[in-house]
Amino acid sequence: MLRIGVAGFLHESNTFLKQPTVYDAFEGASLTRGETMRERWLNASHELGGMLTGAGELGIECVPLYATFAVPSGTIAAETYERIAGELITELERALPLDGLLLALHGATVAENHPDADGELLRRVRQVVGNELPVVITFDLHANISPQMAALSTCAVGYRSNPHLDQRDRGLDAAHLLGRILTEGVRPAQALVSPPMLIQNSRQHTSAPPAKALYDTLAEVLAWPGILTASIAMGFPHADVAEMGAHFIAVSDGDPQRASQAAKHLAQTAWNMRHEFAGALPSVQVAVARAAQATATPVALMDVGDNVGGGSEANSTAILHEVLRQQMRDALIVLHDAEAVQRCIAAGVRNTVTLTTGQPPLTVTGRVRTLHDGLFEETQVRHGGWTRNDQGLTAVVETAERHTLVFTTRRMAPFSLQQLISLGVYPERKRALVVKGVIAPRAAYEPVAKEFILVDSPGATCDNPALLPYRSRRRPLFPLEPDAEWLE
């Protein structure tokens, strides 16, 4: 029987954050080896679950090797990268011989010693398995795809949905594609095209203009004769690396020219729309005023500058300051503040507590409503594909103005309403929801929010790329260089 390995190493690395990401961040989020990996991921709405399931559907022996991820954060410390990459390679070596490998990557992983951390991992994999073994990878829609990643993978399959609701499907695609390579004699030819442009995070909503038109074009390309798969990597602007920006990849059956034609068609479509993928968001003041005047509530104020899914600290009070200044009532905000949680525990449920929290610091007084262990589960398909979640010890405080402040011990991206409902907090009853994300939380919040306002808030994940101190990116790059030309 054919044997394929399944492994994963996923991290979205914001290089503008000063604090490096260490091993504990991965171990604390999810790190599994061997059969424990199957137990953790088989039924998850994640590409790893799709890979494991897809291999089983093909009747191929699936060998779980190693998988880990961490919540988006800063550049991975060199020693952490070496340890994780070393552990994954060790498990791969133990499993040999294999007939193929499925590898879940992010595509925007950066280590202190390897800016192209995904490409470096693939290089080490090739050192072990050789150049002939088929290696099919999956990557996040926000990936920055390097030439090395494209050259060292047999096929690359990217997400097609933001919020990411198709991760499991892409894992299934990768498994079935590997199965065709092994059993049908399919001969993948892969092409990568990288026009000089970036796409702002606020323009990466695949179900809305302008991104929808680009993904409609992708659907057409996927139907072209001879095309095995094709993908768009919209990029992660908060990784200051040479390959930062938008990328387009296509794979044909034995026809490099066809693959190149498909990738160029996608790239040209995006380049023609480049002005639509740039622009400004409403200020904090304007956004809060709109929420205060809204007749249909709640309004989701997307705190773009403090996007946990992009690596932020989840502690910005910029929008809350403005909410208080405009005397708006009945808002909800989740803040990462372990010290505040301890203060609430010391005060006790039903008692009054005064706290100074967040950045810029804000002093609030309220009643401790709830103390909770911070564990919750999400059974629906949601961005990230996570089911079991842990935001650490958590406290809920209610103020006299009916504001609900949720303090967590661990950073948690707002990808599940169970984050709130598990605490006895019902977001549909609020006027405004301060949500620390951009597009990703929509899958969770669309059932309750009547309006979404993306806010030009300050912070480590601000939407305007001109505010970021790039040193390593390619140049020129539209819109940072408005006169950039592409002569592909």
Image: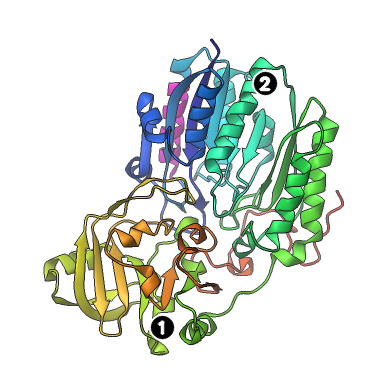
Q: Which mark is residue 323?
A: 1
Residue at horizontal 46 percent and vertical 16 percent from the top: 95
Q: Pointers 2 and 1 in contact (CB under 8 A)?
A: no
Few, some or many C-alpha atoms within 10 Å of disc 2 (few <14, some 14-19, many ≥20)?
some
Residue 320 in which image quadrant = bottom left
Q: Position of residue 195 (x, y in %)?
A: 77, 51
Residue 390: give x, y in percent of width and height. 31, 50
* Helix, strand or loop: magenta stretch: helix
| Region of the chain picked out in magenta, as a range | 77-92
Q: Is residue 464 left or right of residue 322?
A: right
Residue 395 position in % (x across, y down): 24, 65
Question: Quick one: SS at disc 2?
Answer: helix
Which amino acid does the dot numbered 2 rest on? Ile
Q: Which mark is residue 401?
A: none
- Residue visible at 25% across and 84% down? 400
Q: Which residue is mark 2?
A: 181
410 to 222, vertically: above or below: below
| Mark 1: secondary structure | helix
Instruction: Specify the color scheme.
Output: rainbow
Q: Is residue 399 left or right of residue 449?
A: left
Look at the picture and state if 288 lies above or below 50. below
Q: Is residue 80 magenta?
A: yes
